[in-house]
């Protein structure tokens, strides 16, 4: 069953709040690129399309989220904050030295499948991951 529109709207507002608060505190971080996809990612992440065990990021049954639009990392991190996997305090360390909440997703953040920076990397990384999984399955 799909989530109602009101709930998706509420989640999108929460995600945008996290984006604006974290990028304002950081003084940088591409807030508009992040906010432009809030509804899309709220539906994907919270409406049953994305299956992920937050307590076990390495679960082989997890879906893979390759965030090719790496400069929109505040959106990426805000999704996990809205899901309760990242505290608001940790989210406020965006772009700080020694933070796992970096300017582009890297594997220092435990939910990152692959680090991204240049736009378009996600397609080739995803294809490689799919081929590897297919070969492993036999």
Image (spheres, grey):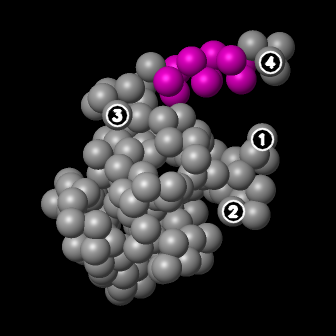
State the residue in front, 32 or 61. 32
Q: Disc 3, disc 1: CB below 8 Å?
A: no
Q: Residues within 10 Å of mark 4 (few under 14, many from 20)?
A: few
Would residue 54 appear left or right of 92 to someone viewing this image?
Answer: right
What is the tally of numbered marks visible in this picture? Answer: 4
> Is residue 1 in view from this perspective?
no
Q: CA distance from mark 3 to mark 1?
A: 25 Å
Instruction: Tell me, yes or no, whether the two marked residues, 1 and 4, touch with CB atoms within 8 Å.
Output: no
| Disc 3 and disc 4 in contact, CB within 8 angstroms | no
In front: label 2 or label 4? 2
Task: Please give the label number shown on residue 94.
Answer: none
Separation of marks 2 and 1 at Cα, in angstroms: 12 Å
Mark with earlier residue (3, 1):
1
| Label located before the other in sequence (1 or 4) | 1
Range of residues picked out in magenta: 125-134
Residue at figure coordinates x 45%, y 45% from the top left: 105
Quarter of the figure with the N terminus? bottom right
Residue receiving disc 2: 54
Query: Which comes sooner in the sequence, label 2 or label 1?
Result: 2
Q: Which residue is mark 1?
A: 60
N-terminal of the pair, mark 3 or mark 4, is 3
Image coords of residue 132 (percent x, y): 68, 17
Numbered tag placed on residue 136 in the rendering: 4
Res 76 → quadrant: bottom left
Give the side of residue 8 with respect to residue 34, left or right.
Answer: right
Labels 2 and 4: the sequence-earlier one: 2
Question: Could you tell me which secondary element the residue under label 4 belongs to?
Answer: helix
Query: Marks 2/4: CA distance?
Result: 24 Å
How packed mark 3 is, by other alpha carbons closer than 10 Å (few <14, some 14-19, many 20 or more), is: some
Asked which secondary structure carries label 1, the reply is loop
Q: Nearer the viewer, residue 58 or 25?
A: 25
Mark in the foreground, 3 or 4: 3
């Amino acid at each position: 069953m799909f989530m109602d529109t009101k709930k998706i709207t509420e989640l999108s507002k929460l995600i945008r709040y996290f984006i604006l608060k974290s990028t304002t505190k950081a003084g940088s971080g591409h807030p508009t690129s992040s906010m432009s996809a809030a509804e899309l990612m709220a539906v994907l992440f919270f409406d049953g399309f994305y299956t992920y065990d937050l307590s076990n990021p390495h679960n082989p049954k997890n879906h893979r989220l390759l965030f090719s639009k790496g400069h929109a990392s505040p959106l990426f991190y805000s999704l996990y904050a809205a899901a309760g996997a990242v505290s608001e305090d940790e989210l406020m360390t965006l772009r700080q030295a020694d933070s796992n909440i970096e300017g582009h997703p890297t594997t220092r953040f435990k939910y990152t499948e692959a680090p991204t920076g240049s736009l378009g990397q996600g397609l080739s990384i995803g294809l490689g991951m799919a081929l590897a999984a297919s070969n492993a399955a036999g």
